[in-house]
Image (cartoon, rainbow, N blue to C red):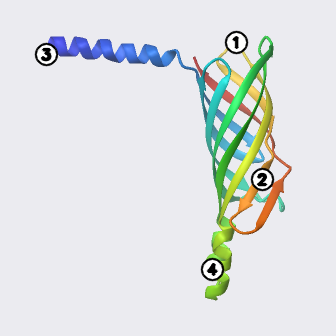
């Protein structure tokens, strides 16, 4: 029993130490969409980011959430001066509109319901550029621009030019 405990302890600390060599970040993005994101670094300058967030009606400056979104991005980061980094990349995502679901439920006509069903789910493609400042503490501040092209599941494509945001990340080092 003592040998099993000793082996388990060694394996646990070995895995914990191996995980410490991989950098990851947890962040909060405020702006175009409010999102919580997790970044996983591999290589020297490559990142994969996954995020979940709430979207707001940008046309009416609504204080209530009108959608939920899930995003996945690939980022390439470049250190241009000490603690300053610039990054760019491309991503994709899915957005589900609460407002359109509510409108869909209120429709009585089956033909109109079938037409509006495709407006509930949006696919998104988004380029991203940003600048990040990494402090000596494991905290980073960033400003980024991520315009989104919405692909609605019918022959209509929308492009949102707004997408400027700021945020903070905690770096697990």
Q: Secondary structure at mark 3?
A: loop
**Image coordinates for residue 90, horizontal then vertical, percent:** 72, 39
Give the Cα separation between the discs numbered 3 and 2.
Answer: 59 Å
**Residue in front for this viewpoint, 46 or 101:** 46
Tell me the residue at 67%/35% (across/down): 74
Q: Which residue is mark 3?
A: 1
Would you identify the image quadrant in which residue 14 lies? top left
Give the Cα separation between the discs numbered 4 and 2.
Answer: 24 Å
Q: Earlier in the sequence, mark 4 or mark 1?
A: 4
**Residue 165 higher or lower than 122, as above or below:** above
Give the Cα separation between the discs numbered 4 and 3.
Answer: 64 Å
Q: Earlier in the sequence, mark 3 or mark 2?
A: 3
Q: Quarter of the image containing the N terminus?
A: top left
Q: Residues within 10 Å of mark 1 (few under 14, many from 20)?
A: few
Q: Earlier in the sequence, mark 4 or mark 2?
A: 4
Q: Which residue is mark 2?
A: 149
**Image coordinates for residue 156, horizontal then vertical, percent:** 78, 66
Q: Earlier in the sequence, mark 1 or mark 3?
A: 3
Give the Cα separation between the discs numbered 1 and 3.
Answer: 44 Å
């Amino acid at each position: 029993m003592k040998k099993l405990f000793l082996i388990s302890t060694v394996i646990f600390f070995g895995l914990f130490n191996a995980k410490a060599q991989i950098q990851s970040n947890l962040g909060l993005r405020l702006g175009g969409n409010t999102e919580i994101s997790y970044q996983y670094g591999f290589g020297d300058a490559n990142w994969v980011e996954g995020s979940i967030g709430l979207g707001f009606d940008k046309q009416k400056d609504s204080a209530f959430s009108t959608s939920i979104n899930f995003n996945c991005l690939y980022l390439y980061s470049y250190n241009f001066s000490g603690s300053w980094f610039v990054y760019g990349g491309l991503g994709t995502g899915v957005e589900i509109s609460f407002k359109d679901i509510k409108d869909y439920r209120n429709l009585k006509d089956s033909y109109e319901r079938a037409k509006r069903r495709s407006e509930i789910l949006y696919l998104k493609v988004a380029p991203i550029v940003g600048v990040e400042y990494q402090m000596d503490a494991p905290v980073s501040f960033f400003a980024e621009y991520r315009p989104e092209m919405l692909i609605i599941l019918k022959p209509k494509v929308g492009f949102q030019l707004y997408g400027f945001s700021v945020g903070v990340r905690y770096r697990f080092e």
